[in-house]
Image (spheres, rainbow, N blue to C red):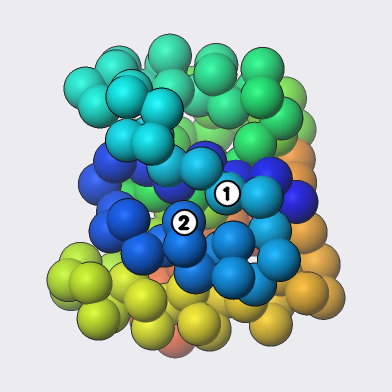
Amino acid sequence: MRFKVDENLPAEVASFLRSAGYDALSVLDQSMGGVPDDQVYQICQEEQRILVTLDLDFANVQAYPPSEGKGVVVLRLAWQDKVTVMEAMQRLLPVMEEESPERRLWIVGEERIRIRE
């Protein structure tokens, strides 16, 4: 799987995904900081990358229909500090080994993952 890590996440998220064997780039790696959401989403589609983000706007299925895109993983966490985000990514990894977020919206919370198709 190929991922793009949004600028609102720690750089370590892309490193973590790469160390787990995934192809991952961050928005900041590509000098895309400040690019509007719709353009980030479009670039993800062009690059065939699943977007990983804290931005709840990407959970809007009318604006970003899961079946029409490559996939979106939204981390919806009470605390968005680096430690909490990395713990969420640790929990997410075994789930991704069992099923793919491709063409889906995954909303990842502290206790569960909601999946929309």
Circle 2 sits on which residue?
Answer: 14
Q: Note whether residue 56 is visible.
A: no
Question: Which badge, 2 or 1, is on the more N-terminal residue?
Answer: 2
Q: Around disc 1, counting alpha carbons within 10 Å, would you say few (fewer than 14), some (14 to 19), or many (20 or more)?
A: many
Q: Residue at x 77, y 59 (%)?
A: 100
Q: Residue at x 28, y 59 (%)?
A: 10
Across and down, in percent, residue 115 comes to: 64, 59
Across and down, in percent, residue 6 comes to: 37, 42
Across and down, in percent, residue 81 comes to: 17, 71
Q: Nearer the viewer, residue 9 or 64?
A: 9
Q: Nearer the viewer, residue 98 or 10?
A: 10
**Distance Cα–Cα, label 2 vs label 1:** 5 Å
Residue 98 placement, left or right of 82: right
Q: Note whether residue 50 is visible.
A: yes
Instruction: Give the answer, above or below, for where 50 lies relative to 36.
Output: below
- Secondary structure at numbered mark 2: helix
Circle 1 sits on which residue?
Answer: 24
- Three-letter code, disc 2: Ala
The tally of labels here is: 2
- Three-letter code, disc 1: Ala
Q: Around disc 2, counting alpha carbons within 10 Å, would you say few (fewer than 14), some (14 to 19), or many (20 or more)?
A: many
